[in-house]
Structure formats: structure tokens, C-alpha cells
Image (tube, rainbow, N blue to C red):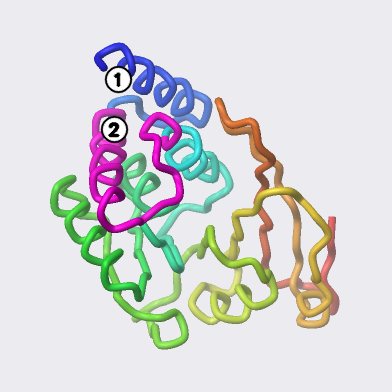
Amino acid sequence: MAADGDRDAARLRDGLARWGLDPAVVPALIAYRDLLARWNRVYNLSAVRDPQAMIPRHLLDSLAVVPWLPEGALLDIGTGAGLPGLPIAIAQPQRPVTLLEPNNKKVRFLRQACLALKLDNVTLVAERIEDFDPPQPYAAAICRAFTDAAGFWAVAAPRVADNAPVIAMKGRPEAESLAGLEAAGVSCRRQPLEIPGLDASRHLLIMERSIAATGMIR
């Protein structure tokens, strides 16, 4: 067990170094993973059951987006078990992160995780995105769960600043219906991600309001 823990910590340190993040947060990331694994046995928060598999599939997958985030407050829409918002909040304690999640059992877990990890930079909102009226716009919004890019833009864009990105975390860069985005004047670009230890395709769909009359797909 000790060897597994050392291996997990080493994988996290490697990932943090890759993205210029402080390795001092490794114990807190491991503590979050352990809490998620314990709660998952009862509350079914994640389809990933193996705690070691949670390192690349949850923690490193979440942290890989950090280089593509602007400075400032982040809105994680439909965060579920806190992904990607909680790993980002742990790795960047200076960044305000709002976790938006309407599911009561997931909210209970998130509340316990924030309390146990003493995450003063995290705000938990137990609402649907359609009902959420933030006091001020966010510097960026992100989501791991939405499958419809245009639908995600429609609910996220009103909650972010005019020049702020709306970022969808995706698997394979398969052809998606972006016609609605182009018609709305939204600029989109795909950013491939490399997740250490994860043999699967990952990329970001980064959406922003376009200065031009029509969107640009790269």
C-alpha cells in the first residue's frame, strides 16, 4: 500500500511539474482522491472505482486544463464529484472557484470535501445552471459533462465576462454540430491534451465570443 501511495504521489508530482504547478499540493490532491474513493463506495459518485485509476482519469485530467485558463474566478458547471473544479482549486489556492451542482448527494460530498481540505477559495452552489444568477461574471466557465457544445455555450455564456472563454472538456475530437455556434458568432478552437498515464484521447473545445460576424472553427 505504501508503494502504491508513493507511486501515486510521484505521478502527481510529474503532472504538476509539467503544468508549472506547486508540488506541495500533492498531499491535498491525494486526500481528495481518498475521500472520493471512500464516498464512491456508497454514493456512486464516479464510474471509476480503482483509486489508482483516479490519478490520471480524474486528477491529472482536471489539472491538464490549467494552462488554458485565464486568471480569475472559475465557474465549474455541473461539477458532479468536483471535477475539474476541486483539483484546480487545490492546485491554485489563489483562484476563486465556484462549484455548481444540483444533485443533493453530490453536494453533500462536495461540502464535506471542502471542509476536510479547508478550501477557502471554493464556493458551492446547489442550483441548476439555468437558475444561477451570479453577482458578477466569471473569468471562465468549464464543464466536463455537457455533450452538446452549443447547449453548453447557451447556458454558460451569460455567466462569464464578454471576453471570457467557455471551455468544454471532451474525449475524441469527433465531428460535432457547431453550426449553432457559428451562427451565434462564437469562435471555437480545439486544444489537444496529453494526460500522463492516460491512454485515451482528450481535448478542450474553447469557445469565445467572436469579433467577426461569424465564428471561426480551427
Picture quarter containing residue 16?
Answer: top left
Q: Residue at x 48, y 45 (%)?
A: 62
Taking 54 as reference, is 181 above or below it? below
Q: Nearer the viewer, residue 200 or 28?
A: 200
Taking 86 as reference, is 179 above or below it? below
Residue 101 is situated, as x and y percent measured from the top left of the image, at 36, 70
Residue 75, visible in the rendered structure: no
Residue 64 is situated, as x and y percent measured from the top left of the image, at 53, 39
Q: In the picture provided, is 129 more to the left or to the right than 167?
A: left
Q: How many marks?
A: 2
Amino acid under disc 1: Gly
Picture quarter containing residue 58?
Answer: top left
Q: Nearer the viewer, residue 218 or 194?
A: 194
Task: Please tell me which of labels 1 and 2 falls first in the chain.
Answer: 1
Q: Residue at x 29, y 33 (%)?
A: 30
Q: Residue at x 45, y 50 (%)?
A: 47
Residue 54 is situated, as x and y percent measured from the top left of the image, at 42, 37
User: Tag 2's secondary structure?
Assistant: helix
Q: Looking at the figure, which quarter contains the N terminus?
A: top left
- In reply to whether residue 12 is colored magenta, the answer given is no
For the magenta stretch, what is the residue range? 26-54
User: Tag 1's secondary structure?
Assistant: helix
Q: Nearer the viewer, residue 217 or 7?
A: 7
Report the disc number at residue 30.
2
* Prevalent SS, magenta region: helix
